């Protein structure tokens, strides 16, 4: 069963079509990733789901009910543009949001989440005294502490250090186990690969990807080689059959031409340098994102 059903939705801002005839289904209990370049329509889509914007055409249903003017119940939303009452104390902010969401046992919930996200010592501090990362964790708590049925997170990991990003990741997975459906937008392709049951990509207002990671990768086939060698990127130049090199320093991700023979390519590499790692694989989500979102970039001819 789908918790969200979007059918042929369009949203315009003047002459600009931000979202064009979008159809999308989000299954209950899933973690659904929204990806796309800045200005592609991700946040506009989220705001239409949240009834901040209304579509100019098409329909949006939540739990089978049509989009209308009534307040959304049992939905938690962490917007991209964060906003908290800076003069309020941390505990008071959470109590306010908890009561607004119709929560119960708020004292214990607040204590649990503050301890989990290492904010207990700041409970009586004003929000304005917190660092940017702390404020982000605080708003995350305000969004999820009532364990709503649907949780929408717009760039939840942005600006967090690895330790706090890991805590949020584990918290999101735990909320899913308890029955929440999670939608989150992100520019972190690695996080989307690891966490999401389904991935949706929007580009210039159009849906260009929608499915599991395996389904998306299968559209491109095993046209990628990952190589780690002593010679690095330099030794790959001039080898026939290589269409593009994504250089990550210690290793290189090579996109092969359709007619390329991987065994011949690795043979050419072995003539030039020692190879520590070699793998033929499907393209990463990051590479697929680049193929779609930056097709106009002039790619180097390595043949």
Image (spheres, helix red, strand yellow):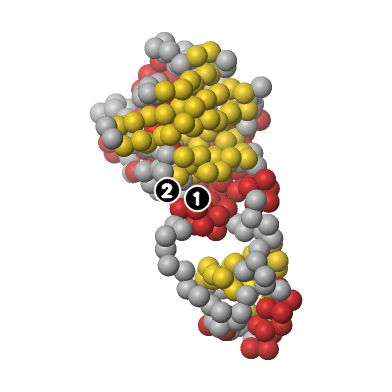
Q: How many marks?
A: 2
Kindly identify the residue that appears in the image at 71 percent across and 82 percent down: 267
Query: For the C terminus, which image quadrant?
Result: bottom right
Q: Quadrant of residue 142?
A: top left
Q: Quadrant of residue 169?
A: top right
Q: Position of residue 276 (x, y in %)?
A: 68, 77
Is any part of residue 158 visible from this angle? no
Query: For the N terminus, which image quadrant?
Result: top right
Residue at the spot of label 1: 188
Q: Position of residue 24 (x, y in %)?
A: 55, 30
Kindly identify the residue that appears in the image at 67 percent across and 84 percent down: 268
User: In the rendered structure, which disc, 2 or 1, sits on the residue that comes first in sequence?
Assistant: 2
Kindly identify the residue that appears in the image at 71 percent across and 79 percent down: 264
**Furthest residue toward top:** 70
Find the distance from the CA under tag 2 to the CA under tag 1. Answer: 11 Å
Is any part of residue 3 visible from this angle? yes
Q: Position of residue 259 (x, y in %)?
A: 67, 70
Q: Nearer the viewer, residue 42 or 188?
A: 42
Q: Which tag is nearer the camera, tag 2 or tag 1?
A: 2
- On residue 37, the disc is 2
Q: Is residue 157 above or below residue 249?
A: above
Q: Nearer the viewer, residue 153 or 17?
A: 17
């Amino acid at each position: 069963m789908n918790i969200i059903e979007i059918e042929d939705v369009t949203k315009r801002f003047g002459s600009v079509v931000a979202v064009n005839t979008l159809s999308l289904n989000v299954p209950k209990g899933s973690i659904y990733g929204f990806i796309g370049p800045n200005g592609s329509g991700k946040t506009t889509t989220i705001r239409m789901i949240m009834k901040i914007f209304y579509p100019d055409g098409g329909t949006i249903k939540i739990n089978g009910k049509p989009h209308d003017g009534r307040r959304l119940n049992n939905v938690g939303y962490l917007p991209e543009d964060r906003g908290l009452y800076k003069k309020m104390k941390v505990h008071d902010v959470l109590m306010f949001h908890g009561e607004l969401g119709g929560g119960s046992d708020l004292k214990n919930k607040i204590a649990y989440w503050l301890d989990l996200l290492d904010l207990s010592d700041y409970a009586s501090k004003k929000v304005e005294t917190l660092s940017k990362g702390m404020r982000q964790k605080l708003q995350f708590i305000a969004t999820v502490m009532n364990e709503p049925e649907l949780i929408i997170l717009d760039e939840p990991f942005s600006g967090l250090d690895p330790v706090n990003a890991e805590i949020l990741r584990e918290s999101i997975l735990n909320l899913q186990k308890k029955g929440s459906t999670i939608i989150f937008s992100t520019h972190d392709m690695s996080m989307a690969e690891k966490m999401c049951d389904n991935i949706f990509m929007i580009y210039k207002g159009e849906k260009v990807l929608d499915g599991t990671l395996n389904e998306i990768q299968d559209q491109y086939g095993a046209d990628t080689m990952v190589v780690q060698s002593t010679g690095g990127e330099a030794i790959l130049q001039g080898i026939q059959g290589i269409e593009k090199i994504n250089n990550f320093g210690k290793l290189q991700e090579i996109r092969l031409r359709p007619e390329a023979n991987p065994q011949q390519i690795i043979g050419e590499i072995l003539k030039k340098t020692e190879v520590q790692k070699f793998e033929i694989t499907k393209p990463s989500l990051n590479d697929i994102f680049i193929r779609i979102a930056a097709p106009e970039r002039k790619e180097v001819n390595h043949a």
